[in-house]
Image (cartoon, grey):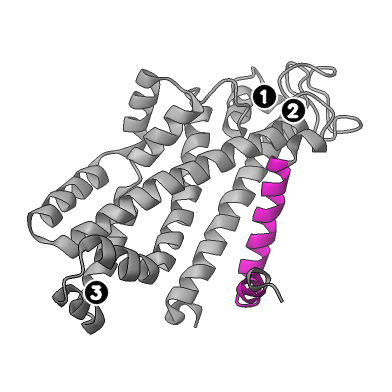
Amino acid sequence: MNPIFTKLKHFWLERTLPGKVALLVLLLLMCMAVFAPLLTTMPHHRSSGPALEPPGWPHIMGTDQLGIDLWAMMVHGARVSLAVGIGTALLAGFGGGLLGMVAGWKGGRIDGFIQRLIDVMLALPDLPSMIIIAAFFGSSLRNIIIVLALFSWSRPARILRAGTLSLKEQPYIKMAAYFGAGTGYILKKHLIPELFPLLIISMIRLASMAIVTEASLAFLGLGDPASRSWGLIIHHAVNFQGIYLTPFWKWWLMFPWLFITLLVTALALLGRDLEGMADPRIRQ
């Protein structure tokens, strides 16, 4: 049997029921994002029917005030949310995790400097600062990912630093350092493999937070106007005059809210399940 298939099978069997459901939801949403052009024949950026049409055929989720198909916007909006979540998790997770491991391993002034930097980032009010920076530098998707990563790296750095402080006291790591192993070797051979589960859990949490924050920025009108993200759909719906006095909210607001909730909940359940693997007490 293929070793990769065997590992995937073991990974699936080790999941709890909530973890399996979360994985299935994430896989469905990822497939929806990847195969978006194949899942709809309607354009997601221009009108394809009457304005504010309720769900039915051929617009299975209805249309917005411009007559744009909501299902088309939803499947293409999944690309935006997943791109923001994965991009932020990779940048902030690996960058912050590496800084945390270096701080924990080196100690001294380097550790002190990185700790003070972490304290400053944790003390800053995230959303107001992001709003100001996003408004100043522009609301392109790349800028949003960079801003989110800039305000998120401190959390994995703090977690990985604590894990490094615990690991560096292990005899085999002390022995490797005693025989002249450098920082790069220690990180590559010992710290990163041992702390990788903690890094993955931190990255899942970062992805969830980034998706919600991007939706919040888009809801406030600071998202990429060309992205048609789920938050931007909610922004246009809420700003439509009389949205709550008409039945339009039943599809115009509910569908993007439902998709955001599904994605964030699935990430939270998967993170909790993986955390149970790292700490059996949580699973019990």
Identify the mark nearer the N-term, 2 or 3: 3
Q: Is residue 121 visible?
A: yes
Q: Nearer the viewer, mark 1 or mark 3?
A: 3
What stretch of residues is rendered in magenta? 6-34
What type is the residue that disc 1 sits on? Answer: Ile
Q: Is residue 80 left or right of residue 48?
A: left
In the picture as drawn, the residue positioned furthest to the left comes out as: 109
Q: Is residue 15 left or right of residue 115?
A: right
Label 1 to label 3: alpha-carbon separation: 54 Å
Q: Residue at x 53, y 24 (%)?
A: 224
Queried whether the magenta region covers residue 7, the answer comes back as: yes
Q: Is residue 211 visible?
A: no
Queried whether the magenta region covers residue 267, the answer comes back as: no
Which residue is under mark 1? Answer: 243
Give x and y (percent) for residue 260. 61, 44
Q: Which mark is residue 248?
A: 2
Secondary structure of the residue carrying numbered label 1: helix
Give x and y (percent) for residue 261. 61, 48
Q: Residue at x 74, y 37 (%)?
A: 36
Magenta: predominant secondary structure element? helix
Q: Which mark is residue 166?
A: 3
Identify the mark nearer the N-term, 1 or 2: 1
Q: Nearer the viewer, mark 2 or mark 3?
A: 3
Identify the mark nearer the N-term, 1 or 3: 3
What type is the residue that disc 2 sits on? Answer: Phe
Q: Are marks 1 and 2 in contact (CB under 8 Å)?
A: yes
Q: Are marks 2 and 3 in contact (CB under 8 Å)?
A: no
Compared to residue 146, the image places residue 20 above or below, namely below
